[in-house]
Structures are given as C-alpha cells and as structure tokens.
Image (cartoon, rainbow, N blue to C red):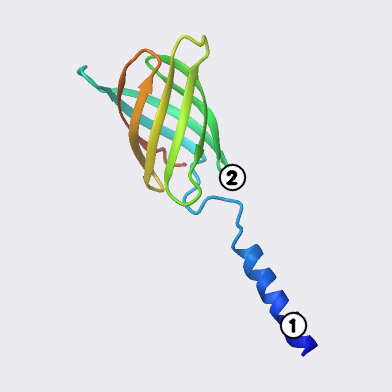
Amino acid sequence: MKYSIMLAVAIIAVGFFGGCASGPKHDNMTGDWKYTFEETGRDGVHNGTMTIAHESYKLKGKCNDAFGEFELSGSISENGPKFIIDGRRNDNKRSFHLTATLLSHNEFEGTYTTNQNTSGTMKGFRLKEE
C-alpha cells in the first residue's frame, strides 16, 4: 500500500513538471531574417534585414531598412506561432508594431502599424546559414 501511494505521487509529480515546459511549443526565431513590406495606399515594396534573439517567450534584436535602424523587442505566444514585435528607430522619431504568424521554420507574415499613421503588410524569410 505504501509503495502504491509513493508510486502514484511520483507519477503525478512527473506529469505535472513534465507538462510545465518553460519554452514555446514551436520554432525558435533566433537568427537573421530578410523581410519585405508594403505600405497600404503606396506603390512599391521595401526590403530590410533583421536579427532576432529568441529566449523563452521574449524576442529582441535589430532591423535595418530604408527608414533606418530599429531596436526590436517583442514576444511569442506560448501555444501558437503568433508573435508581436515593436521596433523603435534609434532617434525615437519612428516606431512600428508588427503582429505576425510563423508560417514555417523559415517564414512569417503579418501586418504592421507605425506612429506615422501608416500601416501595411510584412513578410519575412530566414536567411540560410552558410
């Protein structure tokens, strides 16, 4: 009887701690990315690059495009491939908010808004490591 109780407690503990993983249940976004974005109401596609560090649910990094260099911070959802990134240009005169979804290990897409009252779509592709 005592052995059965100890075994039951051990099984419950393993199940509890095994189910409490501290990381997201999807791909890690750490790496270098190329992205394109189109502003609603304007012609043309803009290009940029970003470097992301992904630790637990937090994202941080830098990006660079025609509008300048931006510091990035954000988070990724615990159970799904959705994430947000906020970018602020080094001179603090321009910022953006991106809401996006990982489509695969190497691709994302989403929508963004800026503090300049513009918005649009963004697509990103992971750069292959050589």
| 3D distance between C-alphas at marks 2 and 1 | 35 Å
Image location (x, y in percent) of residue 102: 39, 44
Question: Would you say 7 lies left or right of 63 here?
Answer: right
Q: Is residue 13 above or below residue 75?
A: below
Position of residue 38 relative to residue 99, above or below, is: above
Question: SS at mark 2?
Answer: loop
Tell me the residue at 50%/31% (across/down). 51
Q: Secondary structure at mark 1?
A: helix
Locate residue 7 relative to residue 55 in the image: left or right: right
Decide which of 98, 33 is in the foreground and name it.
98
Q: As drawn, is 18 to the left or to the right of 1?
A: left
Residue farthest to the bottom, as pictured: 1
Under mark 2, the amino acid is Ser
As drawn, the label of residue 5 is 1
Badge 1 amino acid:
Ile
Identify residue for label 2.
56
For label 2, the crowd category at 10 Å Cα-Cα, with few meaning under 14, some 14 to 19 and many 20 or more, is few
Where is residue 24 drawn, in percent x and y?
53, 50
What is the x, y in percent for residue 45?
Answer: 26, 23
- Badge 1 local density, few (<14 within 10 Å), some, or many (20+)? few
Residue at the image position 38 percent from the left and 37 percent from the top: 100
Between 68 and 39, the one nearer to me in the picture: 39
In the rendered image, which quarter is residue 12 located in? Answer: bottom right
